[in-house]
Image (spheres, helix red, strand yellow):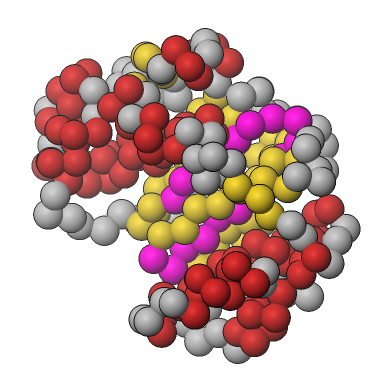
């Protein structure tokens, strides 16, 4: 893996997880404790698979047994590997979709959303979009509004995750340029200069929106389907 390359592992979670016990085995005790508290069987299986897969893929990347990996979290909840300070990863999942991005010597964030209809999209736009974004979205044809909402949402989410502050940063303060959606109009001062951040839309197929944000220029984004790489 090159220094200016990132890898995105993506795909669907299993409908019937035949590897559940193996995923469970490699989880940390804190992850097992959290999973045990999830009463919904499907959500519990997804939690275990997500965290098991992430551990397996991280282990493959850094050459370490997945059950031995120590995943820490920052003050605002961003996961990191304390023993590998130059290594960066970020996770996103929506319904049965999972994305894991990994890279070196940079900050990065990823988001993925299944573009399902929602009754509260207009309310979310009013709350989480800046005025320029609201005007642009409200002037779109009705048949474009759902997917365009998710495009803006994933870009904003990927950015706040990359910064490490998360959603507390305020999505309405992270403003995408509607005329050039791979650029920011404004970001909070605490995040530095706009020129330091790079935004990429990730094509994962119909009815799925995904975005990646990094704080350095990336020469290549490699997509790998997790469905072709099961747990070792």
Q: Is any atom of residue 108 visible in this view?
A: yes
Q: Could you say which is closer to the camera, residue 139 or residue 164? A: 164
Task: Give how far across and how far down residue 97 sits, in percent.
Answer: 47, 63
Identify the residue shown where x is 28% and y is 27%: 172
Magenta-drawn stretch contains 20 = no
Residue 28 in the image: state x and y as whole percent.
67, 69
Is 147 on the left or on the right of 138, as rendered? right
Q: Identify the magenta region.
A: 95-112
Q: Quadrant of the C terminus?
A: bottom right
Q: Is the magenta region chiefly helix, strand or loop?
A: strand
Please state which of residues 159 and 65 is positioned toward the viewer in this rendering. 65
The residue at the point 64 percent across, 80 percent down is 24
Instruction: Give the quarter of the figure containing the N terminus.
Output: top right
Query: Considering only vertical position in the picture, is 75 above or below 30?
Result: above
Q: Residue at position x 75%, y 30% from top? A: 105
Residue found farthest to the right? 63
Residue 222 in sight: no
Q: Is residue 25 above or below residue 209?
A: below
Please tell me how many numbered marks the rendered image carries: 0
Q: Is residue 109 magenta?
A: yes
Decide: is 127 above or below 117. above
Q: Quadrant of residue 128?
A: top left
Choose between 73 and 130: the one closer to the eye.
73
Q: Residue at left 53%, top 13%? A: 192
Percent coordinates x, y for residue 226 in the rendering:
63, 65
Q: Is residue 92 left or right of residue 173?
A: right
């Amino acid at each position: 893996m090159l220094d200016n390359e990132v890898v995105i592992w993506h795909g669907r979670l299993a409908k019937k997880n035949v590897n559940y016990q193996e995923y469970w085995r490699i989880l940390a005790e804190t992850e097992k404790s959290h999973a045990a508290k999830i009463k919904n069987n499907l959500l519990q299986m997804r939690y275990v698979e997500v965290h098991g897969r992430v551990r397996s893929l991280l282990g493959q990347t850094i050459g370490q047994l997945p059950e031995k990996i120590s995943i820490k979290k920052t003050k605002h909840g961003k996961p990191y590997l304390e023993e590998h300070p130059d290594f960066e990863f970020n996770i996103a999942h929506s319904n049965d979709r999972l994305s894991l991005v990994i890279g070196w010597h940079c900050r990065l964030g990823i988001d993925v959303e299944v573009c399902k209809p929602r009754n509260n999209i207009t309310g979310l736009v009013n709350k989480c979009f800046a005025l320029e974004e609201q005007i642009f979205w409200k002037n779109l044809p009705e048949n474009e509004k759902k997917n365009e909402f998710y495009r803006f949402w994933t870009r904003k989410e990927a950015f706040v995750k990359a910064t490490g502050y998360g959603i507390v940063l305020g999505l309405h303060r992270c403003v995408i340029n509607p005329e050039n959606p791979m650029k920011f109009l404004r970001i909070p001062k605490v995040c530095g200069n706009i020129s330091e951040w790079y935004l990429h839309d990730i094509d994962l197929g119909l009815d799925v929106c995904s975005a990646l944000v990094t704080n350095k220029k990336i020469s290549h984004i490699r997509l790998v389907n997790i469905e072709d790489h099961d747990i070792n």
